[in-house]
């Protein structure tokens, strides 16, 4: 409850980003929203926080479109992006497209700043799947969060800016 209050307070006051969350709070929130906390949720949080920083955005400033790849086990990444950015289907700021037929990608997230129009495109290559699966198998929830947050970005995703 405290975490949701903090997110709402930050969104309402527009005084800061969701970066005030602790790793433990992210793990609890991801578990509540998704039903469990795995490395895919952590990856979504990392992408969402990265986009907020790069686009100089506050919670609810971003519009997210997500599409999973042909061999993706689930679109779990988008739940992490949702809780990090506070983009939601109910606010019409989050959309999940039908799966892509591209077997080279795990997922693609297009994240756009609703006010400036600047956007980023995150491509998660299918090679990331084995790394995430290993972390889910070998690590507990908090360790999964740490592993994703401490990994080199290029081992998890490629990002390009769109003007």
Image: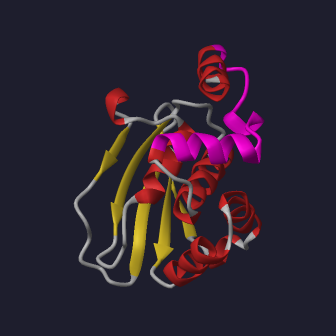
In the image, 79 versus 107, the foreground residue is: 79
Q: How is the image coloured?
A: secondary structure
Magenta stretch in the rendered image:
13-33
Residue 131: where, in percent of width, then height?
A: 59, 80
Q: Is residue 143 magenta?
A: no
Residue farthest to the top?
13
Q: Nearer the viewer, residue 36 or 66?
A: 36
| Residue 84 in view here | no
Position of 33 relative to 68 (above/below): above
Residue, x 51% and y 85% (percent of image)? Answer: 127
Tell whether position 15 is magenta: yes
Q: Quadrant of the N terminus?
A: top right
Q: Quadrant of residue 136?
A: bottom right
Horizontal arrangement in the rendering, residue 3 relative to residue 79 (left or right) = right
Residue 111 in sight here: yes
State the image coordinates of residue 134 (x, y, percent, origin top left): 59, 80
Q: 7 above or below 149?
A: above
**At 65% across and 29% down in the image, what residue appears?**
3
- Residue at coordinates 54% horizontally, 56% vertically from top-left? 41
Q: Residue 135, relative to residue 36: is it above or below?
A: below
Q: Nearer the viewer, residue 51 or 36?
A: 36
Q: Residue at x 51, y 49 (%)?
A: 81
Residue 43: x and y, percent?
58, 61
Where on the picture, by quarter, is residue 108? bottom left
Q: Splitting the image into 4 quarters, where does residue 93 fall? A: top left
Residue 91 drawn at (x, y percent):
36, 27
Magenta span: helix, strand or loop, mainly? helix
Q: How many marks?
A: 0
């Amino acid at each position: 409850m405290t975490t949701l209050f903090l997110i709402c307070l930050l969104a309402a006051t527009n005084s800061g980003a969701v970066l005030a969350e602790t790793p433990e709070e992210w793990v609890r929130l991801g578990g509540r929203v998704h039903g469990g906390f795995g490395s895919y949720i952590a990856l979504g949080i990392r992408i969402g926080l990265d986009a907020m920083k790069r686009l100089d955005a506050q919670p609810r400033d971003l519009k997210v479109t997500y599409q999973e790849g042909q061999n993706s086990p689930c679109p779990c990444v988008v739940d992490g992006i949702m809780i990090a950015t506070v983009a939601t289907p109910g606010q019409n700021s989050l959309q999940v497209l039908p799966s892509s037929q591209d077997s080279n990608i795990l997922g693609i997230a297009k994240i756009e700043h609703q006010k400036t129009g600047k956007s980023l495109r995150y491509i998660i290559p299918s090679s990331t799947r084995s790394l995430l699966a290993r972390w889910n198998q070998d690590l507990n929830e908090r360790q999964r969060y740490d592993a994703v947050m401490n990994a080199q970005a290029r081992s998890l995703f490629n990002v390009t800016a769109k003007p």
